[in-house]
Amino acid sequence: MELEAKLHEIRKPIMVLGTSSGAGKSLTVTAICRILKNLGEEPIPFKGQNMSNNAWVDWEGGEMAYSQALQAFACGINPSAEMNPILLKPQGNSLSEVIHLGKSIGITTAQNYYQDWFIPGWEVIKKSLKSIYERNPNCRLIIEGAGSPVEMNLIHRDLTNLRVAKYLNANCILVTDIERGGVFAQIIGTLELMKPEEKKLVKGIIINRFRGDLSLFKEGKKWIESKTKIPVIGIIPWLNDSFPPEDSLDLIEKKSRFSNPEIRVGIIKLPSISNFSDFDPLENEETILIEWIRESQNLNKFDLIVLPGSKQTIKDQIFLEECGLSKDIKEYSNNKGNIIGICGGFQMLGTSLEDPFFKEGSRSYSEQKIKGIGLLPIRTTFFENKLTRQINSESLWPCHSKINGFEIHNGQTELEYAQTSVNIKPIFKDLNLGWYKENKEGGIIAGTYIHGIFENDNWRDQYINLIRKSKNLPILNKKSIPYKKKRESIIDNLAKEFDKHLNITSVLN
């Protein structure tokens, strides 16, 4: 039987729409997921289509947006690509990789996307919804919209906002960010642009990121409810959250919270940065200050330089060369500098990058094979298919420890010469997952394909202690709070704050 015929039997889905991108939809869904889990329900997150290079790999090897993985953690369940059936990964120049149900199926231009991918996209969304309900008949979907639901030039090809809401007859919540200003116009304008049958689905309004005394908005709340005939079900105060931004551009504004750091970490802000959630565990270390590096500079003030993942490794390596950061990184390595590269950043640390199929940002034949930074004796060749899988391995350095994480990358990396001829050693028992090398001056250059490496608490603690030792800082012997426990605490605190100020029960029926 088709899902449409069974809609009267399912628990009422809740859909969180926003008056704009960045209004707070992702965090609102995360909070609602945990609130409902605490109430004994079976919430499951869903976002029909997401555009992000901040990805996660599920246990079947399927790619999905990290924000939906985080929402699944808030529900207390394992993430699955069905929760985000369409993922678009921007590649620059108006191109995006199209991923359906976790698998890469093509490249599209922005101009051709809705013409070529709308019908198969809607089919894969319906397929995912049907599968979720078949396996979880008592669940309640908590659905996240994308951007604004009333982009009039795109609304006829809307895949992830009002089309999903109408298909499931969901109770919708409209979230607006008061910090941006113009909150009344945002709300009224959004509702006025909806069709009557769409507006009817909106059962509540949330005012997000309110600073100061909430009682000061009493008259504003009354005016909104009088004008829209829709209740304001929550006024959420400004929260100092530690969640990764959905858009890498927001990293520019992301500041570390600790004022007296003992270790300074510089992360290179690559134009095509991906998987920046890798650094959340470092953000939560009280002894560490993180700064994002966007231009050439003397790097010697940093105790660690990180090269993150990249969606366009060739393109980003050319950027490093042209802006001078490649030279800065090499000079830093000669001054006892500690460097670690993750995925694309790992590949860039090698001597060469070869892109015969134009998969990683090479724009011409002259760019198909380029030099890397040259700090590790490795070479990478990019092939047509990429590898996505969960990792369970064991580290050999800086300690023996069980390691979990995941891989998302194109390319195969090999040592240029025999390991015995140079001072390069494997980091893991699975030799292909990464290597490290000590500088003559004492610094360590390392690279790994494992996303989420810093979530491994023992490994992270031992790695940080190596850096502390190089600075003559005392070794931290106290057992740190596991990062995943910290993440649970952050989600709990987020849900607690939302629960104080949100009448969620008003939209459950």
Image: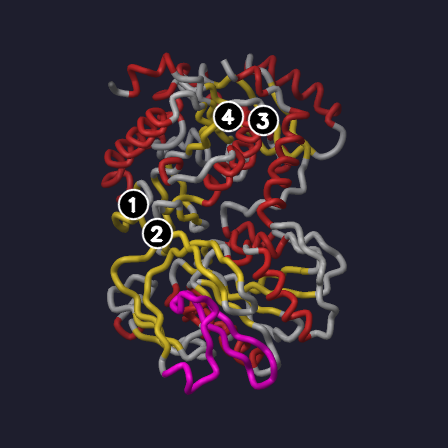
Q: Which residue is mark 4?
A: 189
Q: Earlier in the sequence, mark 2 or mark 1?
A: 2
> Secondary structure beneath disc 1?
helix
Image marks 2 and 1: residues in contact by CB distance under 8 Å = yes
Question: Which residue type does callout 2 highlight?
Answer: Ser
Q: x, y percentage for residue 194?
A: 43, 21
Question: Which residue type does callout 3 highlight?
Answer: Asn
Image label count: 4
Question: Which residue type does callout 1 highlight?
Answer: Gln
Magenta highlight range: 418-447
From the viewer's perspective, tell me whether residue 417 is left or right of residue 274. left
> Secondary structure beneath disc 4?
helix
Q: Earlier in the sequence, mark 3 or mark 2?
A: 3
Residue located at (67% from left, 42% from top)? 240
- Residue 397, relative to residue 275: is it above or below? below
Q: Which residue is mark 2?
A: 94
Q: x, y percentage for residue 485?
A: 61, 44
Residue located at (71% from left, 60% from top)? 287
Q: Which residue is mark 3?
A: 38
> Secondary structure beneath disc 3?
helix
- Who is closer to the viewer here, 61 or 215? 61
